[in-house]
Image (tube, rainbow, N blue to C red):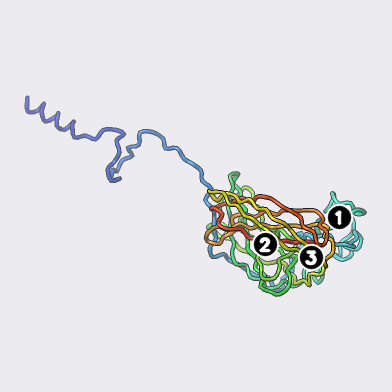
Amino acid sequence: MRYLFLLMFLLSACAPASGTACPGGQCNEDTTSGPVASHWTATPSLTPTPNILVIIETPIPSSTPFVYTIQSGDTFSELAEQFKISQDELRAANPDISPNSMSIGATLLIPDISAAPKRATPTPEPVPVTQSVCHPTADNGLWCFALIQNNTPDLLENISAQITLFDENQSTLESKTAFLPLNMIPPNSALPVYVFFPNIAAHDSMQVQVLSAVRSGGTRYLPASLNNVITQIDWRGLSAMISGEISQPVESTTATRVWVAAVAYDKDGRVVGLKRWEGGAIEAGERLAFRFMVSSLGPPIDRVEYVVEAR
């Protein structure tokens, strides 16, 4: 009896206690003593080798709207005639625009440009799309960018691209038209087109189709330049404060409106943020100060590049 009691005591001493850790992670049973708290992190959904297509002769479908920037001398009736639509259709697509007091630099939504492919949808330049990337947001959306490179000696304007997201079965999740933050890309420069997809937390792949890209002589753009630009990236790389001045040469004319686009890149050269600053008029020979902040939607900011536009 004494030996039986000693044997039972030794067996009970060798049994593992409930809730203890498994050395080396080799336990076969779950020994967790309580529920594990989950923490949401916004991991960028990257597409390192995107499926990029460049449309050369295919016109934009009629369901795709076109954004037109109002120029000096434009009238509502002439624009309706140019895009082969009625004034009523143009007014219905732009209820906030007064036909009798259109502001230069404001934008009009052209509801159907397929009727005038020669004027509204010229053959796009075969511009390279050097990268595409999407970053998730806290509200289960995606900001997507496609970087357009202008390798020509001319300005490129009226740039748009169709960005389509696919799931793991290569079924289309959603497709939208993306636009630049400015009206043009200067020679030997790059700017991303961008678009937001709500209620899409992730995707497997994406496709970029360049819909429009037109070479321009640049006669309606003024020769503005950036001076004394200072970029202050915070220690975590989550944002960058940008300040500087826009100058107009003395021999130029007065600019009624100026813009500065700031593109933030991570250490791998991928677009992680974009911000456009808009200023007022600037006289020839004068300078206009600017200051604004661009934030990262993904990894830390490593550098910021700028493009200025004056009209």
Q: What residue type is labelled 3?
A: Pro
The earlier-in-sequence mark between 1 and 2 is 1
Secondary element under disc 3, as helix, strand or loop, is loop
Please tell me which residue is depicted at 64% across the width and 49% down the height of the picture: 198
The nearer-to-camera label among 3 and 1 is: 3
Residue 15 appears at what percent x and percent y?
A: 21, 34
Please tell me which residue is depicted at 63% across the width and 58% down the height of the picture: 263
Q: Which amino acid does label 1 sit on?
A: Ser
Q: Mark 2 points at which residue?
A: 162
Decide if residue 133 is on the left or right side of residue 257. Answer: left
Residue 82 appears at what percent x and percent y?
A: 87, 66
The quadrant of the picture occupied by the N terminus is top left
The nearer-to-camera label among 1 and 2 is: 1
Corner quadrant of residue 78: bottom right
- Name the residue furthest left: 2
Please tell me which residue is depicted at 14% across the width and 32% down the height of the picture: 10
Decide if residue 106 is on the left or right side of residue 17. Answer: right
Q: Which amino acid does label 2 sit on?
A: Gln
Give the crowd class for mark 3: few <14, some 14-19, many >=20 residues within 10 Å. Answer: some
Please tell me which residue is depicted at 65% across the width and 65% down the height of the picture: 190
Secondary element under disc 2, as helix, strand or loop, is strand
Which label sits on residue 249? Answer: 3
Q: Mark 1 points at which residue?
A: 103
Corner quadrant of residue 249: bottom right
